[in-house]
Image (cartoon, helix red, strand yellow):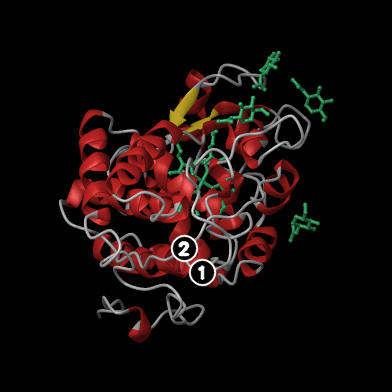
């Protein structure tokens, strides 16, 4: 039975109901008249960079997630701290957020082609899409544009809004609900953990001291735990990283769910998706590549619409790391 279709509106799922993916105030090809080559310029630079750096898609999709979860998709994740302000970038969950130099490179090219037109927020959204899409040689989802850049970036908000990898299902669904994303989106977007890496100290409690008695997490496959212990040698290892998806690390596919079903999710927040019966059955559905990719397209569009600034709100930053 085919449960997933490419249109987000007609999908039937076990949980949640997919809503209109993007609000009307974002538009397809917003820059068509003002900067006709904008999307092409982004794609060319991103594809060139991804071709030389297969880790980049993970950095850029995670940057997009962090941007959207703090004050909406407004490019606030890109802003540098100043003497008077500790920005989102300085928040602990940002440790592995990277790729800022690539965003700056894209912005510089766009400023050259059409100064003051394309927002940093749109560059993040397009770059995330294009980096993941390189593997498919075609855009995996549509990115509507017209986002404007925010002028505020606070470390304290990043620490509050971005869910911790130690979260349980309740905490995760609450964090997503606060962004108008439902449990279905939570399960689907977590599938981005099919690429990239995680630092040992975000999960090593599951290996070495789960309940404070030197034990491991019983919900983690014991063979996998033994393997992870050979990588993360102690609880305090905060420098080693391991692949989030050990089967196909740099490939954007459904193997995150294949691993997860075998109790091989890396973080407690991954394992938590098996603790709710409806989420668990959705995990089963998403082990099929087609199902995952179709579902991801819909949920990532919803994510890209979180609290966007449009019209005359916000600004078009000249440089992505500083407000005008
Ligand atoms: C559901 C809640 C989520 C939690 C608790 C979470 C937590 C984490 C943590 C702790 C890491 C490792 C960071 C590090 O080692 O420095 C990570 C990596 C990553 N996350 Fe998530 N994440 C979540 C959702 C998402 C979403 C929605 C996306 C994108 C749509 C995403 C994409 C990624 C990617 C691609 C990486 C690898 C980054 C890299 O290789 O540098 N995550 N996540
Ligand atoms: C989930 O975590 C929160 C915050 O740590 C905690 O208050 C809550 O009791 C937990 N819920 C369950 C069902 O374990
Ligand atoms: C394990 O956790 C307990 C309780 O929090 C703590 O007392 C103990 O020192 C921890 N063990 C290690 C090796 O960190
Ligand atoms: C990593 O751990 C070392 C030793 O425990 C500590 O000095 C250092 O500040 C930690 N680094 C980070 C980034 O947390
Ligand atoms: C890229 C970036 O700004 N990372 C920061 C994340 O948080 C740590 C700890 O606060 C900073 O030292 C990093 O510079």
Q: Quadrant of ligand 2?
A: bottom right
User: Which residue is located at x 59 percent, y 55 percent?
Assistant: 150
Query: Looking at the image, can residue 263 be seen?
Result: no
Q: Is residue 145 left or right of residue 50?
A: right
Dots 2 and 1: beta carbons under 8 Å? yes
Query: Looking at the image, can residue 9 be seen?
Result: yes
Q: Which mark is residue 310?
A: 1
Horizontal and vertical percent position of residue 287: 33, 59
- Cβ of mark 1 under 8 Å from ligand 1: the answer is no
- As drawn, the residue found furthest toward the left would be 137
Which quarter shows the C terminus? top right
Pointer 2 or 1: first along the chain = 2
Q: Residues within 10 Å of mark 2 (few under 14, many from 20)?
A: many
Horizontal and vertical percent position of residue 17: 48, 82
User: Which residue is located at x 30 percent, y 76 percent?
Assistant: 4
Q: Secondary structure at mark 1?
A: loop
The relative height of residue 90 versus residue 25 in the rendered view (above or below) is above
Which quarter shows the N terminus? bottom left
User: Which residue is located at x 31 percent, y 72 percent?
Assistant: 28
Considering depth in this image, is 220 or 244 the residue closer to the camera? Answer: 244
Give the quadrant of residue 106.
Answer: top left
Q: CA distance from mark 2 to mark 1?
A: 5 Å
Horizontal and vertical percent position of residue 55: 34, 33
Q: Which mark is residue 147?
A: 2
Q: Secondary structure at mark 2?
A: loop
- Cβ of mark 2 under 8 Å from ligand 1: the answer is no
Q: Which mark is residue 113?
A: none
The relative height of residue 277 versus residue 323 in the rendered view (above or below) is below
Q: Residues within 10 Å of mark 1 (few under 14, many from 20)?
A: some
Q: What is the tally of numbered marks visible in this picture?
A: 2
Considering depth in this image, is 111 or 135 the residue closer to the camera? Answer: 111
Horizontal and vertical percent position of residue 168: 67, 55
């Amino acid at each position: 039975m085919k449960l997933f279709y490419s249109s987000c509106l007609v999908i039937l799922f076990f949980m949640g109901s997919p809503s209109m993916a993007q609000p009307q105030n974002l538009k397809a090809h917003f820059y068509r008249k003002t900067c006709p080559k904008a999307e092409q310029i982004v794609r060319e630079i991103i594809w060139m960079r991804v071709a030389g750096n297969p880790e980049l898609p993970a950095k850029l999709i995670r940057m997009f997630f962090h941007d959207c979860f703090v004050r909406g998709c407004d490019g606030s994740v890109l802003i540098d701290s100043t003497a008077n302000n500790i920005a989102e970038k300085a928040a602990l969950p940002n440790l592995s957020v990277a790729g800022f130099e690539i965003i700056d490179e894209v912005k510089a090219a766009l400023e050259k082609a059409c100064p003051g037109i394309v927002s940093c927020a749109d560059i993040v959204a397009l770059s995330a899409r294009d980096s993941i899409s390189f593997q498919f040689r075609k855009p995996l989802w549509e990115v509507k544009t017209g986002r404007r850049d925010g002028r505020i970036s606070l470390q304290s908000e990043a620490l509050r809004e971005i869910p911790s990898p130690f979260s349980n299902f309740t905490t995760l669904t609450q964090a997503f609900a606060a962004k108008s994303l439902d449990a279905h989106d939570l399960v689907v977007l977590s599938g981005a953990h099919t690429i990239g890496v995680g630092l040992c100290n975000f999960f090593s409690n599951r290996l070495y001291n789960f309940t404070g008695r030197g034990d491991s997490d019983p919900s983690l496959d014991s063979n996998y735990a033994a393997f992870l212990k050979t990588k993360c040698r102690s609880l305090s290892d905060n420098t080693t990283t391991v692949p989030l998806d050990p089967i196909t690390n740099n490939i954007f596919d459904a193997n995150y769910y294949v691993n997860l079903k075998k109790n091989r999710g890396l973080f407690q927040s991954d394992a938590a998706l098996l603790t709710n019966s409806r989420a668990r059955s959705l995990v089963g559905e998403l082990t099929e590549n087609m199902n995952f990719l179709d579902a991801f397209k819909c949920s990532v569009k919803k994510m890209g619409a979180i609290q966007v600034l449009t019209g005359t709100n916000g600004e078009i930053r000249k440089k992505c790391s500083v407000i005008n």
